[in-house]
Amino acid sequence: MAYDDLRAFLDALDRQGQLLRITEEVAPEPDLAAAANAAGRIGDGAPALYFDNVTGFTDARIAMNVHGSWRNHALALGLPVNTPIKEQVEEFAQRWDAFPVAPERRENAPWSENTLDGEDVDLFKVLPLFRLNDGDGGFYLDKAAIVSRDPDDPDNFGKQNVGIYRLQVKGRNRLGMQPVPMHDVALHLRKAEERGEDLPIAITLGNEPVISIVAGMPMAYDQSEYEMAGALRGAPAPIVTAPLTGFDVPWGSEVVLEGVIEGRKREIEGPFGEFTGHYSGGRRMAVVRIDKISYRTSPVFESLYIGMPWTETDYLIGPNTCVPLLKQLRAEFPEVQAVNAMYTHGLLVIISTKKRYGGFAKAVGMRAMTTPHGLGYVKMAIMVDEDVDPFDLPQVMWAMSAKVNPAGDIINLPNLSVLELDPGSQPAGITDKLIIDATTPVAPDDRGNFSTPAKDLPETPHWTAKLQAMLAAR
């Protein structure tokens, strides 16, 4: 089932018992973030949270942890609520092959019901803002999908980017924004500044669930997130033209902010509790000026808690990081079987592959580090054989313990790029990268004693299914 807006998805979560409505009065700080933080500690079945009785706000509606469990992630893709994570990733990969699916253009977006322009623009009138971690430098919009276009090729639909980037609220019409150099919006901003121009953007909040998934997905520069959303939804993504910028934005958003990133202007932004589980310090970052706000009547403000994993962020960007890496690697190395990039947005990846010849797995690991996502994120790659499930950590640990000889299987690559948010980088944005080859050596690599592997008995799959059925029937 495809959802056209956030409200339809919240209703679906409610019907499946995956939405918890908290009706008691809560404080905006620390209760909202603490509750979402706690949801990440409940486990894979945690519900979304909905608050509508928040101290200090007369009419706030706040949704958190919307993608924050594998149950919710399955429902976002229209899958049965109990679909295992490995099957969700496999389904994700199959739907990828339907790309591109052209979007459906609509009129009369619900967010066009109310507008604020010019001097009337005031984020505090529309959004119930609160801090997510007690050390944050201010209020953040951390689940907004930001739309920008390539200034040198503005009519190229594929180069129109939809991405999630953190935004610090600095005033009634001002935001601080972190354009990570590896991301498309940073390339757009650089081109605009080279032309001596501001970069127009549209910021959309409270989106249908698949838009949020693709906005955090490492796609190629000229691949459209809307066309990928259509593939993942199994139905065209509904879009509409934003009135000020003329950009294509989701039809079902709760709030749309339009304005510009001001060219060659930087101000201190941060600190912020990040997906790495550490605060990023204050840095000079881009500045956004908001010139128009459009919003639904009684909008639902969607936010997510971000901090020490696992949080909603990890569910949101786990499969959508695994699958692009898998597809990009398979395009050159069809021997690659599966990619697990669930850990801290792929700073660590586990890749299972067949080998053509000795040293092949190490080459695949190096290629993972030079994919569009890998340039900024893949810091460590663990390579395992094709019969090792990279999503089964006991199997991975067995491969690490039984197959790795540090004398030749640990490859350190010095002084490579990584995003500045990696707390281990020194200086920020530069790190050594590591490949651990936990595959079985093949000719001409004749190291070790791996001639007689122990395999599962042929009857094991039958008995696995039988025991599972017996347990389910108890």
Image (cartoon, helix red, strand yellow):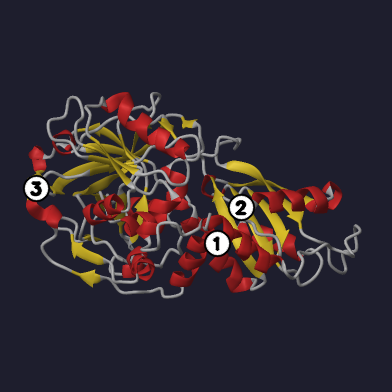
**Mark number for residue 349?**
2
Q: Residue at x 76, y 53 (%)?
A: 399
Check if mark 2's residue and mark 1's residue have beta carbons within 8 Å. yes
Residue 197 vs residue 89, the one in the foreground: 89
Whole-percent x and y of residue 10? 26, 51
x and y percent of residue 83 in the render? 46, 59
Q: Residue at x 31, y 69 (%)?
A: 157
The label on residue 325 is 1
Above or below, 466 against 174 in this view is: below
Q: Is residue 405 visible?
A: yes
Image-based side of 322 in relation to 146, left or right: right
Label 3 neighbourhood size at 10 Å, few (<14), some (14-19), many (20+)?
some
- CB atoms at circles 3 and 2 under 8 Å apart? no
Please give the name of the residue rendered at 31% of the width and 60% of the height, measured from the top-left corner. 149
What is the distance, in whole Å, between disc 2 and disc 1 at their CAs? 10 Å
| Secondary element type, mark 3 | strand
Real-space CA distance between mark 3 and mark 2, rounded to the nearest whole angstrom? 44 Å
Identify the residue under disc 3. Answer: 115
